[in-house]
Amino acid sequence: MAATKKTATKTTVKKETATAKKTSTDKKTTTKTTAKAPVKKAATATKTTAKAPAKGKAKTATKTTAKAPAKKAATATKTAAKAPAKSIAKVATATKKAPAKSAAKSATKTATKASAKSTTKTAAKSTAKKAPAKAAAKTEVKKRVPKAKKPTITFDKELFKRSVLYNVRTLYRKNMEEATPQQVFQAVSYAIKDQIVDYWMKTQEAYEREDPKTVYYLSMEFLMGRALGNNMINLMAYKDAKEALEELGVDINVIEDQEPDAALGNGGLGRLAACFLDSLATLGYSAYGCGIRYRYGMFKQEIRDGFQVEVPDNWLDNGNPFELRRPEYTKEVRFGGYVSVRTDEKGRNHYYQEGYQAVKAVPYDHPIVGYGNGIVNTLRIWDAEPVDCFRLDSFDKGDYQKAVEQENLARNIVEVLYPNDNHYAGKELRLKQQYFFISASVQEAVAKYMRNHKDIKKFYEKVTFQLNDTHPTVAIAELMRILMDEYYLTWDEAWKVTTRTCAYTNHTIMAEALEKWPIELFSRLLPRIYQIVEEINRRFIVEIEAKYPGNKDKIAKMAIVYDGQVKMAHLAIVAGYSVNGVARLHTEILKNQELKDFYEMFPNKFNNKTNGITQRRFLLHANPLLADWVTEHVGDEWITDLPKIKGLKVYATDKKAQAEFMNIKYKNKVRLAKYIKEHNGIDVDPRSIFDVQVKRLHEYKRQLLNILHIMYLYNEIKEHPEMEFFPRTFIFGAKAAAGYRNAKLTIKLINSVADVINNDKSIDGKIKVVFIENYRVSNAEIIFAAADVSEQISTASKEASGTGNMKFMLNGAVTIGTMDGANVEIVEEVGEDNAFIFGLSSDEVIRFENYGGYDPMEIFNNDPDVRKVLMQLINGTYSEDTELFRPLYNSLLNTLSTSKADTYFILKDFKSYAAAQKRVEEAYMDKKRWAYMAMMNVACSGKFTSDRTIKQYVDEIWHLDHVTL
Ligand code: NBG
């Protein structure tokens, strides 16, 4: 419960506290409640204990025991029988892992009983041998850890165990010993879902009752990753579930590993959407994520002979235990045909789409569990099914050809996610996908609103649509269509509602990412929608002319429909009530460069919302060792109030704390080294610097700069074998869009360089290069936790924000980066001394772009180091085929065309990057200094929680109402 409070805005705190108390008294607080709160709070613990309905518990325990394997039974019984407050210690003692002695020791040593508990827990968890004693000792230093909150929600561990056993039996006719890990995963997930469903229903009841304003986050992409671990975390049930599974003889990590990532997104934009949903639920706001249930998500990447090979991601192969098909909310979506107009007796025109092809949109709901507050929101993703034949437009009834086409349309439309990041492909099917999920989502939003409200003209008071980039922009015209054609609003009335409902987030300034649809295609596929867009455009041009009489240039630059194209960003800006960028610098560039004309016309629409990430997934789940350590030092409030993590600052100079912190980092590096060995067959030394660049492969992100620098370092070591060099492991992870030649070639280059360097005995393993195959959310969690150095080296001005940069920071990696995107704000928070900044500024880049004056050939001619590295691209050093990497070589030098050479200023920034890397090495060799820097990064990461971002969206754009259960 306290969790809810923490996240609430200041004004509401008191009220919520009251509610919170009430709720938790009402509820049965069980063993697991206590277990969950990693807790310093003796008082709380005792209270909770008092409340635990002892009888009920005991009963449950007995039942479970009957089924549980004999040995574990003892533990189970003990656990259940004990008063909750003590149960942790008990489990720890009873299970072999936790060294009984250290647990006892720590218990006596620690100041409060409660923190003793958390220590014990840590011990039980994983670090075993030495950690507990040390941690306890350190506790004495000065720590006054704030009290932990009690959870609002309860997790019934015994019920969970029974449920798992039952599910394995009924789903697979097996017992635990016989079931495969995948089957156990399914059984466990259904058991967790069972517990979620109650809260899901309660949340819906609360929403019905309180009728809060709701945000529909409309997005082509939701890069959710795995659900099971996250759901357990947010139910505050992870540790209990882990114990329960142990008691059933199952390792929770093995089970979590069975789950395929829900990879319904490309990269940053889709992952941001996922973090936002987590924060919205955790903060207690009514929200739907609306998207597409792609049959195949982001492709799986295999590396064969160093090249990326794309393999279909059949993520639904084993079924998806967390989803819920909701056929009762099916909608029909119409494509093509023509529009006919009929005038009624009052002289009003009515528009009808006829001769169309229709497809059924069937929603699948996924629960989005808020952390510890019982709120469960919904991610609703739409599947396509053919319409029943009898629903064919009468004109076409019995038209066999048409029926088959509709069947195919349904099959194709949700078949696959387009694997382009920051790049627009202009495919017809893509526009179909967009309209498909938007039409269904908007229809449902209107229908839902009308179930409880009478006046459609007040729609915007209860509903807001956030357009995640321009992909969902047809929502504007679709809402206009529904309001006018189905609810008979006039244009002006409909416009008033629409422009108060829709808001737009811009995620990029990359020109090639801007969506422009050919009129021919757009009007053929969406005839009625096109009419509406044209009319919006006509009226907008009238406005432009009024403001800038005679200025044809403005019209050319700003019109929505121009030059045979429909410009989606323009439509979004004109109709949206808010336009936001995703980091301060990015928003400034939008205002002053890319969208300057629009900013001039609508200055009040523009605002910034610097991105954020959820610490629940990216620290609490991804890095349990560090998460527990943080909790020991500053309490657990950071889980829902990340700025509290700044309490760590005082430990950044503390010797003992530094040692513990670096020890945790080391263990996480061992974990990653093991992963790399298993997946890549490469041995890496966890004592080397782990220098990591993981993100989509894109020229502007400059993985090429990184690998060229590695080639340079290798040359240096070869030429000066005696020089001091701290061993470094360079780790890459990246998917390239399937049709992106230079990106794919860069992957091959990284692998070729890795082959040569990793196998060169003469350098004594000083450099290792690893390309981690199939980078995705689930392995990202392991990677971030293990990183020392975070590579954020995009060409300044090109990376709108970045969010990986924040995940690294939160996990104690130090940034080497340009002043781009959110790096600027990261450096502002952590201080320049605790980052390694290099390269051109965005102003300098923009100046070169606008006025010229940069010639990479000059650098090539004058810098022998750069020259040598570039020659190695084409002289057989890294490939027998000397032509293989020539396209990369050409992209950097003006061999083919003068204007295009080194578009991303790689050579220009090379020297300053190399110098920054030198500073990284020096800093790392000073152990104390590095520990300080890394810890300061964690301590200063508070701003970058998506909870803060969402609060800003709520306060400044959406104005949602806060709900508690
Ligand atoms: C990406 C940007 C990132 C940003 C994410 C989330 C697109 C189109 N843009 O810098 O490149 O962090 O969006 O805002 O995917």
Image (tube, grey):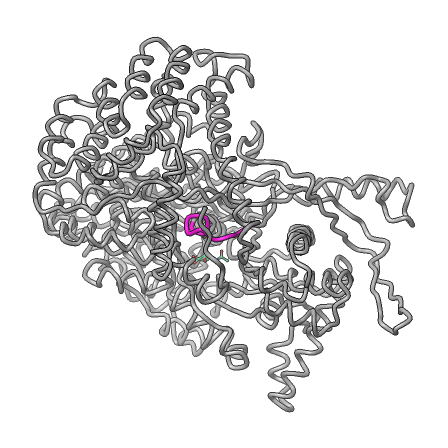
Foreground residue among 606 and 308:
606
In reply to whether residue 556 is colored magenta, the answer given is: no
Nearer to us in this view, 538 or 118:
118
Residue 887 percent coordinates (x, y): 47, 54
Left or right side of 652 for 682 = right
Q: Is residue 280 magenta?
A: yes
Residue 577: percent from left, percent from top: 55, 70
Residue 223 point in image, percent of width and height: 49, 45
Q: Name which quarter of the figure residue 838 lies in.
A: bottom left
Can you say whether 482 is above or below 684 in the image?
below
Residue 702 appearing in the image: no
Q: Residue at x 22, y 63 (%)?
A: 832
Q: Judge from the rendering whether residue 856 lies leftward or rightward of residue 531; answer left or right.
A: left
Q: Nearer the viewer, residue 718 or 696?
A: 696
Query: Taking 253 as reference, is 402 above or below it?
Result: below
Quarter assignment of residue 940: bottom left
428 sits left or right of 228 in the view: right
Q: Quadrant of the N terminus?
A: top left
What range of the chain is rendered magenta? Answer: 279-287
In the foreground, 495 or 681:
495
